[in-house]
């Protein structure tokens, strides 16, 4: 341009046929201390112009070393909508649904008359994903729904699902005129079937923002990453007063993580408490590059060793896995 069991959501951009359904995508992982039960990572991505979902499994418990599953062939191939998805996110269930995973994404769409829906797959074992569904989450005056993601809101007892949209005047039904800036919208759901009325989460007009990822740091603290679509950079903000608290930029109001990037996704290290990996998609280059930090009170990200990080991966997400999950993924598609 992020578990009730296991659910996956995907997001895509391109030409869109009119369809009375929707598409969805999630991408956030809660912070944690060193947890020996987590033995590796599952990465889910799309590749360039190929709008399918590909799985990558870490080489052991290394957060920046991955190998393709299924011989490099896609794991999930959408059949609804335009038959393509992008920006996949995998979300772990919260509350009573702790056995599930959700996989969400957006489907191929344009900015003026794109998909207003999200794709959703659901699983309890990361192997069997059932039948995909499309769910409309946005109003008809929006031009698109891009890069959906989700995070469990313990205070609400539901999932906060967020995405990027732009809006047109109500009398511009064909969306041929001038739109407002891209902004981050959200809705709540408990089942990824029914969603609350969408509302605005982040509006930095006239600056356009897309590709939000939220990382829980525990105790009501969060870090969030998003793309400044106007200036084509990614920046970080932090809140120590909840999801709807006061957000500030470590490093100052103009601080950025990197320029000429998009699709930020952050995840905690399984072995070293406080270590965070952030992947950024160089959209005019060779895809994702990994970066690391051990202090999210500052905006200081070091380039990670990319030797064993695959080239060409596009906007996606990463989930920590247990030994049983790691073994099952390896046995099925390794």
Image (spheres, rainbow, N blue to C red):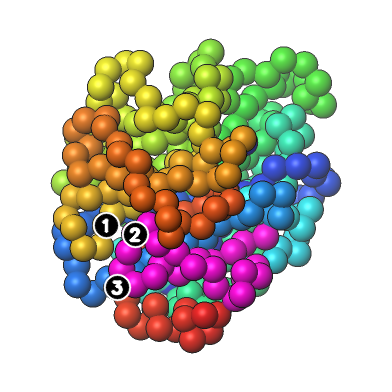
Q: Tag 3 or tag 2, which sits nearer the N-term?
A: 3
Identify the magenta region. 52-75
Where 229 sits versus 24, above or below? Answer: above
Residue labelled with disc 3: 39
Specify whether residue 71 is painted magenta.
Answer: yes
Residue lying at 36% horizontally and 50% vertically, measured from the top left: 305
Give coordinates of residue 61: x percent, y percent.
31, 68
> Residues under labels 2 and 3: Cα distance?
10 Å
Residue lying at 22% horizontally and 50% vertically, measured from the top left: 275
Residue labelled with disc 2: 63
Disc assigned to residue 292: none
Residue lying at 26% horizontally and 32% vertically, measured from the top left: 300
SS for dot 1:
loop
* Disc 2 crowd, CA 10 A, few/some/many (<14, 14-19, 20+): many
Q: Tag 3 or tag 1, which sits nearer the N-term?
A: 3
* Disc 1 crowd, CA 10 A, few/some/many (<14, 14-19, 20+): many
Residue labelled with disc 1: 269
Q: Tag 1 or tag 2, which sits nearer the N-term?
A: 2
Give coordinates of residue 79: x percent, y percent.
75, 64
Q: Is residue 303 left or right of residue 48?
A: left
Q: Marks 2 and 3: which is nearer the front?
A: 2
Marks 2 and 1 close (CB-CB < 8 Å): yes
């Amino acid at each position: 341009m992020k578990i009730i069991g296991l659910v996956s959501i995907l997001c895509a951009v391109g030409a869109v046929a009119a369809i009375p359904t929707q598409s969805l995508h999630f991408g956030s992982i809660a912070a944690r201390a060193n947890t020996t039960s987590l033995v590796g990572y599952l990465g889910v991505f799309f590749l360039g112009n190929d709008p399918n979902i590909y799985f990558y499994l870490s080489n052991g418990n290394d957060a920046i070393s991955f190998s393709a599953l299924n011989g490099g062939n896609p794991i999930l191939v959408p059949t609804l909508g335009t038959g393509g998805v992008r920006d996949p996110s995998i979300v772990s269930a919260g509350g009573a649904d702790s056995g599930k995973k959700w996989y969400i994404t957006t489907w191929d769409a344009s900015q003026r008359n794109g998909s207003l829906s999200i794709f959703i797959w659901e699983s309890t074992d990361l192997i069997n994903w059932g039948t995909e569904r499309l769910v409309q989450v946005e109003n008809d005056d929006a031009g698109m729904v891009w890069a959906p993601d989700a995070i469990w809101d313990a205070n609400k007892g539901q999932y906060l699902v967020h995405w990027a949209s732009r809006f047109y005047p109500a009398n511009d039904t064909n969306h041929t005129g001038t739109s407002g800036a891209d902004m981050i919208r959200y809705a709540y759901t408990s089942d990824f079937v029914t969603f609350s009325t969408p509302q605005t989460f982040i509006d930095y007009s006239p600056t356009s923002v897309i590709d939000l990822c939220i990382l829980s740091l525990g105790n009501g603290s969060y870090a969030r990453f998003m793309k400044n679509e106007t200036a084509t950079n990614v920046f970080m903000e932090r809140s120590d007063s909840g999801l709807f608290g006061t957000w500030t930029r470590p490093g100052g109001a103009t601080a950025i993580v990197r320029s000429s990037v998009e699709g930020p996704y952050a995840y905690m290290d399984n072995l070293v408490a406080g270590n965070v990996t952030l992947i950024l998609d160089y959209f005019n280059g060779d895809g994702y590059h990994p970066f690391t930090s051990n202090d999210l009170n500052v905006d200081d990200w070091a380039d990670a060793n990319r030797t064993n990080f695959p080239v060409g991966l596009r906007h996606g997400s990463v989930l920590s896995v247990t030994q049983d999950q790691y073994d099952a993924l390896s046995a099925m598609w390794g």
